[in-house]
Image (spheres, rainbow, N blue to C red):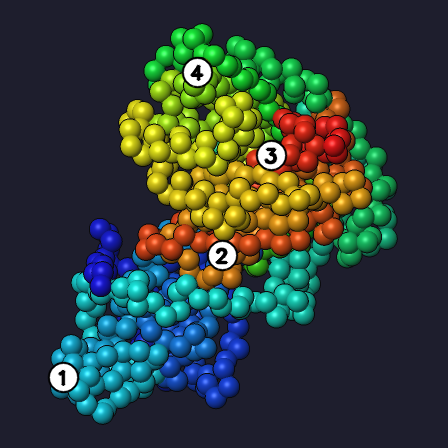
Amino acid sequence: MTHIKTQYNRRSFIKVSAAAGGGMLIGFSWLNGCKPNTPELAEGVAVPKEWFEINGYIKIGETGMVTIYSPNPEIGQNIRTSMPMIVAEELDVPWENVVVEQAPLNTGWYQNQFAGGSLSIRLSWNALRMAGATGRRMLMEAAAKEWGLEVADLTASEGMIKEANGERSISYGEIASKAVGIEIPEEVELKAVNDFKLIGTSVKNVDGKKIVTGEPLFGLDFHREGMQLAMIQHPPAFGMKVKDFNEAEIKSMPGVTDAFIIDTTIAEPGGFDEQGFKHLIAIVGKSTWQLMQAKKALKANWETSGELESSDTHLKRLEKALVSGEVVESRKDGNPEAAFKRAAKVIERTYSAPFIAHNTLEPMNFFANVTEDAAELIGPTQTPEALEGSVAKLLNLPLENITVNMTRIGGGFGRRLYVHFGVEAAAISKKIGGPVKLIYSREDDMTQGTYRPTYRSVYKAGLDENNNLIAFSVKGAGLPDGPIFPNRFPAGAVDNYSAEKINAETNVTTGAWRAPRSNFTAGAEQSFLDEVAEAAGKDPIDFRLELFERAIKDPVGEEYEYDAERYAGVLKLVKEKANWGETKPEIYRGVAAYFCHSTYVAEVFDMVVNDGQPTVQKVWCAVDCGIVVNRDAAKNMIQGGVIDGIGHSMYSQLTFENGAPNQMNFDKYQLIRHSQAPKEIEVFFVENQIDPTGLGEPGLPPAIGALANALYKVTGQRHYHQPFMTEKQVVG
């Protein structure tokens, strides 16, 4: 068993108090992550007489029911289910006795209260286990005191405490009130991983039924009596701002109660404050239909405030950056220049990807109710603390006067890390002096910004006369942030290696999109490695494994982010599961592997030709993410990442003309269709006892490389520029 301290080099974060009607409350101040679940109890399980609504607590009622208040947003990664499983495991309470509820933002109780970077389980693993184990230990101490025994004389399992050498037993609910006076232990004992009963199993999403039956869960569902609705209009192009509009005419339209220009400029913006459009036209009214009609009647005067960039401008800027741009991050091992000169073969290729939008299924929305001295905000945000801070600055109110409550999020992918839509709702509410819900149209969202940056990278490899890789270089630029990770593979596996990251300027606003930077780099790198392997006359997987073998036995340099053995491990696993090397008539295979967010994923794509079109028939995935908490949920995240990677790399792009995006809705911006998704995605996990790492993001990046490599096998054509559909497709 593992022992863990219950204090974290700061004030003790656990406190216990009596619950009404008996029971025990265990509070902990840095639980990072699950989402609410209204009580849907198993047959025969009674609801406690009272539940305390206190942020940051595990509650144990007199019936033995356990409620977990959880701070983090649920964006579809299933932490509403998976995180309570961890607490229930260590507490050793039946899963059917667990209820989960959402806590509001509370920086006094919680840390890392956000959803992003595949961090929820990773950051919360020890806190959740500790909370459950502490509760179990205190209940056992209370029972030991009641019976005049030592804790060592008792066992606890499935919500019951029993004598090890006797017949007495008592339920958690029956002893909970007696545990209130027990001193919190300085150290608690955690279960051995081999003893887990709940973790590692498949538990259904606790919100599944509500989602499919349409029960109100999402921000767009939220309604409060007396609230008005609002929509906005931002400038039509980056580099423009609003001057004025036909205000009187808009105000006179049916259902419109007000129209005005809002200013959401914050003097000292934070990292999640979107900086594209700070002056917006806001229209307030009774129904979305009436507001949409008013938007159509807008006659605004816009004025130029900066450069009106086009896609040609972006391409030239990236090309120039690769030649003469400032390198902001780099690595160099050996002497790549000299190695390239003596190489028998040199392969050099350029890869690119366009700006893309997030396009969350749930339109952007937020509720705000601003009064003279306070502000209440409710809606779908990945960063509630950032929103709280930005609204406080905008309204010049103290943080303690701002409350943020989180709804379930209908898609995030990084889009809802940025808080401008909540800030805009607050500005509108302040102006009208009442509650309002702001709703974006799809066009508002797609043309507003915070896009995935556009990238361009040049890869170069040198092989000696024996087809050994002796030199490797990569230089990548992005608008505005370059895509290169200098210390990732193949750093450490090649004697002569260089990597350079270059940033370039644009006034198109960008932000994190699922697996930031990795979503491009993995596809480019893994496509390039396949081409190098072919030039070397080697099997693509064997070629990679040779490099990993070097990184394992005799790594080059001192810094590299990845564990070469774990990286090689997922390649070996996917090779085994997919029966790589077997020839199957009319099936074309591509492979890729990538490491990001502390997780290793390898994928093999099986592609066929249907009616002259390449189609992904099956995907094999091997994943090393440490301990898997909820097996089905973990598989679902990998499967979703694969589909997302295929769809965006194959079909999606945003192009610009004079600062304005050409694609404003799904009539011109293509997302993957059901018929274009893989027919089957099989996921296999490396079994180990390493603490859990990320899962929401790592499944996507290797899908792009595996797709490109499979397409090459079908068409004989390499793919260098996303979206691949824009490159000529010839099925041989």
- Indicate which disc, 2 or 3, sits on the residue closer to the N terminus: 2
Q: Name above or below for residue 301 compared with residue 376.
A: above
Q: At 20% across and 75% down in the image, what residue appears?
A: 182
Give, as a three-letter code, the residue at label 3: Asn
Q: Name above or below for residue 627 compared with residue 470.
A: below
Q: Is residue 165 visible?
A: yes
Task: State the residue in front, 439 or 572.
Answer: 572
For marks 3 and 4, give the one nearer the viewer: 4
Helix or strand or loop: what does disc 4 sit on?
Answer: loop
Badge 1 vs badge 2, beta-carbon distance below 8 Å: no
Q: Residues within 10 Å of mark 1 (few under 14, many from 20)?
A: some
Q: At 51% across and 60% down in the image, what residue appears?
A: 633
Label placed on residue 709: 3
CA–CA distance between discs 4 and 2? 42 Å
For marks 2 and 3, give the one nearer the viewer: 3
For marks 4 and 2, give the one nearer the viewer: 4
Say left or right for 568 vs 581: left
Badge 4 vs badge 1, beta-carbon distance below 8 Å: no
* Location of residue 54 (image quadrant): bottom left
**Residue 624 position in % (x across, y down):** 42, 49
Q: Residues within 10 Å of mark 2 (few under 14, many from 20)?
A: many
- Indicate which disc, 1 or 2, sits on the residue closer to the N terminus: 1
Task: State the residue in front, 494 or 8.
Answer: 494
**Residue 664 position in % (x across, y down):** 76, 38
Give the residue pinned by disc 1. Answer: 149
CA–CA distance between discs 4 and 1? 74 Å
Quadrant placement of the N terminus: bottom left
Task: State the residue in front, 351 or 710.
Answer: 710
Give the residue pinned by disc 4. Answer: 464
